[in-house]
Image (spheres, grey):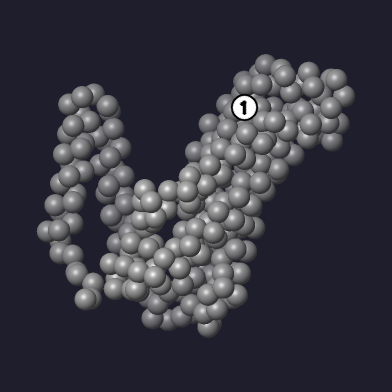
Amino acid sequence: MGVISLSALDLSLAAFLLFLLAVTSFRIGLGLEKRMAISGVRMTLQLLLIGLVLKVLFESVSFVLVFIMSLFMLLIAGYEVWARQKRKLRGATGYLISTGSMLVSSFTVTFLALTIMVGVDPWYTPQYAIPLLGMLLGNTMNGVALASDRLTTEIYNQRGMVEQRLLLGQNWQEASGEIRRDCMRTGMIPIVNSMAAAGVVSLPGMMTGQILGGSSPLDAVKYQILIMFLIAAGTGFGVVTAIWLISRRLFDERQRLVLDSLSNIRGR
């Protein structure tokens, strides 16, 4: 059985459910109706646009086009991570750290998957490269954003304790070690929970999509297992890299806490 095509009416009915939810939000005073409407319209336009772009990429199989698309995805993901933080590193540093940590983790893991595990030829075949990178970037982005936001917030909120430890002779790694470990756990918990629930509580998106597309359930399961392992590795290494780089910016070479590097701080 092939893929059942969806009509505009089918999508409209699904959108109507979101409209009903927005009305409910308005009636009970949640205040989310405007955000729901904007997010729904934005999602629709973005997915339609990416559908057209992917159609061109799949037909051309061009390394240059795949590279440009991948770079665009990375830059947007880096901005999303930076924008979600309440207390950001000043200047372009925060954005560069967010982008760099995902570049090191997601791109490396994706390259290894394409060249060694999947073994597609050429390795930059867009049908495999773009979806794999997209899933890795999306999950790594969430993990890095959660961990980075908590790190800067907790360091600021517990600055007194951190500075006391520094005065007692601890270096910056020892003084902030517990906070950094908690932040890393925060960034990794979502993917760990997803792995624990996969196949029991939920059927992951890629597996569901392949089954709906007519693939064998066993083949879909194999790909999903591969993807979950890759996402976990990419997220974990991305979180560790981001936390380390941000921490280094919060302490100077004389082992002092430097909170002036954070935005939204007007003195102490």
Image: 233 above or below 168: below
Residue 185 position in % (x across, y down): 59, 39
Residue 241 position in % (x across, y down): 67, 48
Q: Residue furthest left?
A: 9
Q: Amino acid at mark 1?
A: Glu
In the rendered image, which quarter is residue 257 located in? top right
The answer to whether residue 261 is visible is no
Left or right of residue 224: residue 25: left
Image: 19 above or below 231: above
Helix, strand or loop at label 1? It is helix
Q: Nearer the viewer, residue 45 or 145?
A: 145
Taking the spot 18% from the left edge, 57% from the top edge, the residue there is 11
Taking the spot 66% from the left edge, 46% from the top edge, the residue there is 240
Image: 7 above or below 101: below
Left or right of residue 70: residue 21: left
Taking the spot 53% from the left edge, 70% from the top edge, the residue there is 67
List the residue tagged with mark 1.
Answer: 154
In the rendered image, which quarter is residue 203 located in? bottom left
Q: Nearer the viewer, residue 122 or 50?
A: 122
Q: Residue furthest front?
A: 200
Taking the spot 63% from the left edge, 34% from the top edge, the residue there is 182
Q: Nearer the viewer, residue 34 or 19?
A: 19
Residue 29 position in % (x across, y down): 23, 24
The answer to whether residue 212 is visible is yes
- Quadrant into which the C terminus falls: top right
